[in-house]
Image (tube, rainbow, N blue to C red):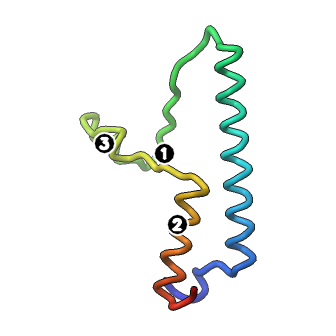
Amino acid sequence: MSKEDKLTPEQEKELVKIVTEIEAEAIQMKMDYEKNPSDESGSVVYIHQESSLLENEDEKLDNMALISSNKLLAKELKKQKKKKGDK
């Protein structure tokens, strides 16, 4: 990873703030759904036009999933700082 690809401390803080806001909204949406369930429940899967899933119907979706949360992001940022020698 080159220097220009790395986030500044301000960008890292902003990213963590945005992730936290998105996660809070998702939790609120889940709580709202639990109180007011929809009759049209179900999962929607979006697949990118260049996804390998379009070529291989036997490929499992769980191998392609991305899990993100502010805790995981903070942990990853901490690892990157340790690699750089920051504390």
**Label at residue 55:** 3
Q: Give whichever of discs 2 and 3 has the lower sequence position.
A: 3
Quadrant of the rendered image containing residue 3: bottom right
Q: Are marks 1 and 2 in contact (CB under 8 Å)?
A: no
Quadrant of the rendered image containing residue 87: bottom right
The type of residue carrying mark 1 is His
Q: Residue at x 54, y 52 (%)?
A: 68
- Judging by the rendered image, the residue that carries numbered circle 2 is 75
Give the CA distance from mark 2 to mark 3.
34 Å
The mark closer to the camera, 2 or 3, is 2
Mark 1 burial class by Cα count in 10 Å: few <14, some 14-19, many 20+ = few
Q: Secondary structure at mark 3?
A: loop
Q: Look at the picture and state if 27 lies above or below 36.
A: below
> Along the line of sight, which residue is nearer the eye, 44 or 12?
12
> Along the line of sight, which residue is nearer the eye, 44 or 83?
83
Give the CA distance from mark 1 to mark 2.
28 Å
Q: Look at the picture and state if 82 lies above or below 65.
A: below
The mark closer to the camera, 1 or 2, is 2
**Label at residue 48:** 1
The type of residue carrying mark 2 is Lys
Quadrant of the rendered image containing residue 24: top right
